[in-house]
Amino acid sequence: MSSSRPSSFHFETNHRRLWLDPHDQTFFQNPYPAYGRLHAATPSFFWENYGFWCFIGYDAVNKLLRDRRFGREKRNSVADSQGNIGDRSHLKDFDHVEKFSMLELEPPAHTRLRTLVNRAFVSRQVDRLRPRIEALAHDLIDRFESRGEAELIADFATPIPVTIIAEMLGVPVESAPQLLDWSHRIVSMYMHGRNGESEERANAAAAEFSGFMRDYARRRRADPRDDLLSLLLAAEADGAKLSEDELVTTAILLLNAGHEATVHQTGNAVKTVLEGGHDPARLFDDPESVAKTVEECLRFDAPLHMFTRYAYEEIDLGDGITLQPGNQIGLMLAAANRDPRAFGSPDVFMPNRTDQKNLSFGAGIHFCVGAPLARLELQVALKVLFDRLPNLRLNGQSIYRDTYHFHGLERLHVTW
């Protein structure tokens, strides 16, 4: 990766203020030099472009993810999760979906929803999908192997997780292009600097996606099958079932989260391995080496760079940081993964490192419910890819999307 400094980076040391546009191309193409400069200066800073305190130290991020004085649920703030204030009548359908999302809720509502969903994502359940993921990876490679080249984001990284989560839920795989479109439009709401047009598109996507899932929920009520939608319809926790709104939102969340980060991480991992100068045959030789390689890929170039939380009371975090109820903080997961106080040679890709403890899936009660599935998809898909195409190499520059904290490649051209 380039070591060039971000062109818009300005840090005021005395007050720990950072001015850095997340849409600056030098930065979002490679945020790690900026993280390195910040690690050398401070474990926390006020990011003026976002308007809140951010934390990059591994120990601080890990601790704050688990601190129950903070949460995702908006209780004391008039701003939304991106700090926006104002009329939201044009976001009625989007807000209705988000209102029932376990990602945006805290106990006891979060506990009940998570309990109902968790049973489908425990490791022993997920591992049953291994043969299907492997077969799908082989099938995709069969389609482009003879060409001698491919754009792996579209041809490989995207189809695997979206197909698997659609099959798990019990919705038609043929709907994948539409599901992806809805998902991308909804996820744009969490980006820095969104505009009115993107808000209108996200709201329309939420309405259409909700209608789609309500239709399939009605079908599964009348005709239950061996899929996650049927399981959620039948599931109970403490005698309470999911309401239809909760069911629809949970299905949308699982579809969105079930592919978005995994697509990004698959592309990031392929790029990392090919740029790292390692022999892929050794990295993906046996289950242990595969698992270690995937964990290091997750640490080295994570798909999610920022996770925000609200303060629920007045909190003195020391170092001159006092928060009021409703204030937000930014937890910099990918920066924490490069903390030199937590990792030896943090900017070096080392699959056999002994200090592997990445925060890419978060921590605490909002630890990614789909982590076992994401890890399995990455382990199986990457092994198949490098086994089938041992001479894989990058073809041209790999370009990241201008979607800073959802860090993933726009395209990944390869040849063999």
Image (cartoon, rainbow, N blue to C red):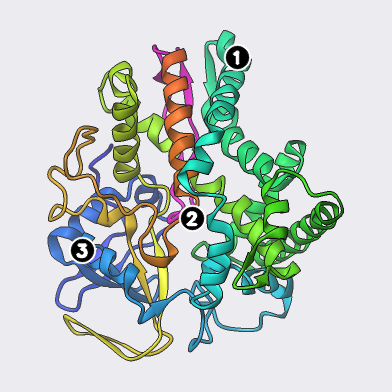
Q: Is residue 398 something that shows in the picture?
A: no
Mark 2 or mark 1, which is nearer the start of the sequence? 1
- Residue in the foreground of this view, choosing between 399 and 218: 218
Task: Say which quadrant the C terminus sits in.
Answer: top left
Q: Quick check: 212 left or right of 155?
A: right
Q: Amino acid at mark 3?
A: Asp
> Which residue shows up at 25% across the image and 23% down it?
277
Q: Which residue is mark 3?
A: 59
**Magenta stretch?**
389-416
Task: Say which quadrant the N terminus sits in.
Answer: top left
Q: Quadrant of residue 93?
A: bottom right
- Which label sits on residue 302? none
Callout 3 secondary element: helix
Q: Amino acid at mark 1?
A: Asp
Q: Quadrant of residue 39?
A: bottom left
Callout 2 secondary element: loop
Q: Which residue is mark 2?
A: 369
Q: Which residue is mark 1?
A: 142
Using a 10 Å C-alpha cutoff, classify the residue at mark 1 as few (fewer than 14 neighbours), some (14 to 19) or many (20 or more): few
Report, in whole angstroms, how far the alpha carbon at label 1 lies from the one at label 2.
32 Å
> Which residue shows up at 33% across the image and 22% down it?
286
